[in-house]
Amino acid sequence: MQWLGQMNDAIRYIEEHLDGEIDLEKVARIAQCSSFHFQRIFSYMAGVPLSEYIRRRRMTRAAFDLQNSDARIIDIGLTYGYDSPTAFNRAFQGIHGVAPSAARQEGAALKA
């Protein structure tokens, strides 16, 4: 059961660093395995690849930021690792089904 605690610690690290760079080697060290094995174990346990999990979590946080702050859309996109408004818009629409500007409207239905 110790490995489950290590996996939870690794996920906690990922969650705390969604708005910055996530060092996969550090995540693997926290889980006490190689980066390759961590990604395989994570994918098996979560049913989704680690990179997809991180992308979805960042889009969820971006949606929350859009609805609860007055920050510019481009700034929120930059916070979560997107270098251009087009890339952020495309990724956001892919996850939530609406443009980031539409997410700011009251009653916008977004996925978490």
Image: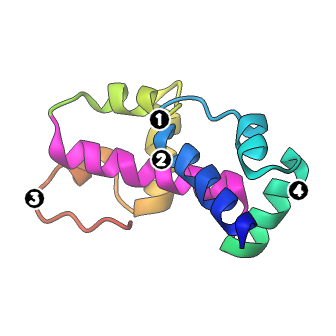
Q: Say what secondary structure mark 1 lies in.
A: loop
Where the C terminus falls, by quadrant?
bottom left
Q: Is residue 65 magenta?
A: yes
Mark 3 or mark 4: name the one nearer the start of the chain: 4
Looking at the image, residue 63 sits to the left or right of residue 17; the answer is: left
Q: Position of residue 85 (x, y in %)?
A: 44, 30
- Dot 1 corresponds to which residue? 80
Q: Say what secondary structure mark 2 lies in.
A: helix
Q: CA separation, marks 3 and 4?
A: 43 Å
Q: Is residue 92 visible?
A: no
Q: Is residue 110 above or below residue 87?
A: below
> Could you say which is closer to the camera, residue 32 or residue 109?
32
- Dot 2 corresponds to which residue? 58
Mark 2 or mark 1: name the one nearer the start of the chain: 2
Q: Which region is colored magenta?
A: 48-69
The amino acid beneath tag 4 is His
Q: Say what secondary structure mark 3 lies in.
A: loop
Disc 2 vs disc 4: Cβ atoms closer than 8 Å?
no
Residue in the image at 64% along x and 63% along y? 5
Q: Say what secondary structure mark 4 lies in.
A: helix
Q: Quadrant of residue 72?
A: top left
Looking at the image, residue 91 sits to the left or right of residue 41; the answer is: left
The amino acid beneath tag 2 is Arg
